[in-house]
Image (tube, rainbow, N blue to C red):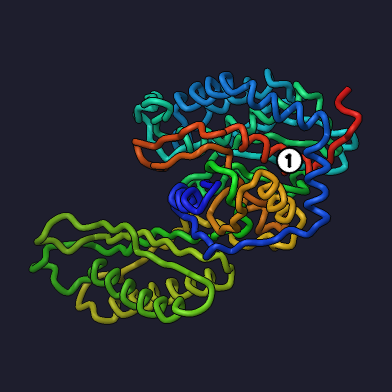
Amino acid sequence: MRQISLLTAAVFVTSLGTAHHLQAQQITPDKQYVDQVKTLADQPAVKKAFQIFIDLEPQTKQDHLTLTEIPSPPFKESVRAKKYAAMLKEAGADSVWIDEVSNVIAKRKGRSGKKTVVVESHLDTVFPEGTDVKVKPHGDTLYAPGIGDDTRGLTAILAVLKGMEKASIETDADVLFVGAVGEEGLGDLRGVKHLLRPGSPKVDSYIAVDGDGISSIVHRGLGSHRYRVTFKGPGGHSYGSFGIVNPHSAAGKAIYYFTTAADKATRQGVKTTYSVSVMGGGTSVNAIPYESWMEIDMRSESPEKLNEVDQLLQTAIQRALKEENTIKRQGPDLTVDVKKIGDRPSGKTEATAPIVQRAVAITKYFNAEPQLDVASTNANTPIALGIPAITIGSGGIGGGEHALNEWWLNDKGYLGMQRILLVLLAEAGLNKGGKK
């Protein structure tokens, strides 16, 4: 995520890929939250932690390099998870464990423990096995795949834990520092979905840290449905078997019917998108294919609009299937397999909610201009479940996310940790007596 100015806000959108910046939507926080933030920031222990983040910069950089150079491809985050768990334990967490799906969870007990606040970054990157993840410095800028998204986030919340320990800060609520798996692509937010699965311990607030800067506040989850659709037939010679069902013909009809209907449905209301993104099938120019497959992506922050477009796809598929079978001259019927390969929930934490108001007030405290955003992040899941949740950046500036030349620059990066700490304390409550 990007922050600090209109320029960095624009970089933020690029970093997420899935983000849509809200036409400079800004908000003035209620005075009670401005006062709360000033009171928090004036506490001696908090001031001490702020300085500790600055003093820790050399170690924070080394932690950043160490984690970046541990490959963490989709569905294979376990090596990085083990190292991150060890780092959280060394930083002073009361207990650390790795759950069934390889999420790293570090618990720091609060005075009462009546509430639980999560601060989380994701362990996975988009890069496959074999990618060179060695960090290459160019002047003050660090280049490496995954160095920003989201290794910087992992490093930032690790530094926040260290700062809280060294400054003897105690919260009222329990705090879970989480390194989650499966945020990217077909990971489909699986780590957070598992963390917040039915029957799991209650979470009262959720702070995701993804991207950089200190301006953006994602409070609206951009949901998505993704499908792999495969039409299947017997296949055969283009001349000798002519008249059998043709999967490509059915796929083409399905695309036409879907995009025609979806175009009409998405021209008004909340921005909703759709894309037939990947296609394949067939063996030769003189062979009727035995299968035709495609992958479709649709997105909206409105669950209702997302479901509407989804239904248009299902209707188009069945219409195309029926028509292709109707015109066949010989052979068995065409079949279709519709597999959902992605389901990211959508929704929003209202701009008037305390967690958003506090984040806005805190951003202004740092003389940055808060920008309310919509994006697809790990906060989607708690937002959809009604848990107050936002995603904020981790400080500094960067770019090239999801590209081999991804970069990050430590431009007052400590401000990211200071901001995360204040949001965390505003949600978890600060015990002014300090940690015993």
Task: Name the residue rendered at 27%, 60% in the picture.
Answer: 291
User: 170 or 311: nearer the eye?
Assistant: 170
Task: Name the residue rendered at 46%, 53% in the picture.
Answer: 10
Residue 350 drawn at (x, y percent): 70, 63
Q: Secondary structure at mark 1?
A: helix
Task: Name the residue rendered at 80%, 57% in the picture.
Answer: 31
User: 350 or 48: nearer the eye?
Assistant: 48
Quadrant assignment, res 174: top right
Residue 76 drawn at (x, y percent): 48, 33
Visible residue check, residue 123: yes
Quadrant assignment, res 413: top right
Residue 183 drawn at (x, y percent): 53, 44
> Where the C terminus falls, by quadrant?
top right
Q: How many marks?
A: 1
Residue occupied by mark 1: 422
Residue 42 drawn at (x, y percent): 81, 37
User: 121 or 46: nearer the eye?
Assistant: 46
Task: Name the residue rendered at 47%, 33% in the picture.
Answer: 409
Left or right, residue 157 beside residue 42 = left
User: 63 or 380: nearer the eye?
Assistant: 63
- Residue furthest out toward the front: 367
From this view, report whether residue 79 is shown above or below residue 381: above
Left or right, residue 434 beside residue 194 = right
Badge 1: residue crowd in 10 Å (few <14, some 14–19, many ≥20): many
Left or right, residue 81 beside residue 421 = left
Visible residue check, residue 380: no
From this view, report whether residue 265 is shown above or below residue 385: below
Left or right, residue 262 beside residue 283 = right
At label 1, which amino acid type do we have?
Answer: Leu
